[in-house]
Image (spheres, helix red, strand yellow):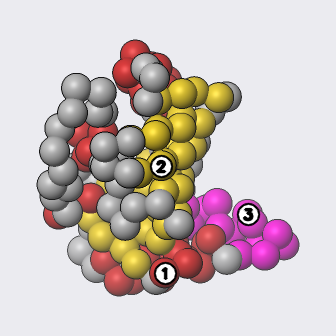
Amino acid sequence: MRKYYLFIIRNDYKNNAHTLYVTLDNIYKLKNKNFGYGISIYNQLCQVFNTDVINNYLSNKSNKYIKKYHNKFFINDVYAKQKTCIQINHSCIVIKTNSNIPYALRIFKWYSNNIFVCDFANNDYFWLNDYIVHLPKYEYCL
């Protein structure tokens, strides 16, 4: 299972991906007593997601492969053998999947050009705009 965190990064902080990843990883691992500091750093680096736009888009795509439960969307892509859960938050989008690069990343590539993807458990990170998801398009796909 992979767990990706998607952040919208402000233009001023797009230069060094490694430093950006280390900073976001430190925020991710902060203890509760330093939470205010983490929020301050997050607000300097990141912009929030418009959850209404994303929820509306995914809700309109809901079918037998995409199910919604509260702020989460569950996608069962039987053809690509991918199971994905997308959790919609203002601060970040969390994608849990059994795939290394889930097809669901496509929708967020269209949402913004400044999305930075982190997998903190596997020390993996990349700019979504630089990563092309090459998968066949089925009629039910996002």
Q: Amino acid at mark 2?
A: Lys
Was residue 141 drawn as part of the magenta stretch in this picture? no
Report which residue position mark 2 lands on.
83
Q: Where, by quadrant of the figure, is residue 20 drawn?
A: bottom left
Report which residue position mark 3 lands on.
36
Q: Is residue 32 above or below residue 56?
A: below
Q: Label 2 to label 3, Cα distance in Å?
A: 35 Å
**Residue at image x 57%, y 27%?**
68
Q: Earlier in the sequence, mark 1 or mark 2?
A: 2
Q: Nearer the viewer, residue 117 or 72?
A: 72
Which element carries disc 3, helix, strand or loop? Answer: helix
Q: Which mark is residue 122?
A: 1
In the rendering, at what x and y percent does residue 118 appear? 44, 68
Q: Earlier in the sequence, mark 1 or mark 3?
A: 3
Q: Amino acid at mark 1?
A: Asn
**Bounds of the magenta span?**
30-45
Q: Tell me if mark 3 has few (under 14), some (14-19) or many (20+) residues whose alpha carbon lies within 10 angstroms of its own.
A: few
Which element carries disc 1, helix, strand or loop? Answer: helix
In the rendering, at what x and y percent does residue 15 appear? 24, 74
Q: Nearer the viewer, residue 46 or 57?
A: 57
Q: Nearer the viewer, residue 20 or 133?
A: 133
Q: Nearer the viewer, mark 1 or mark 2?
A: 2
**Residue at image x 67%, y 77%?**
29
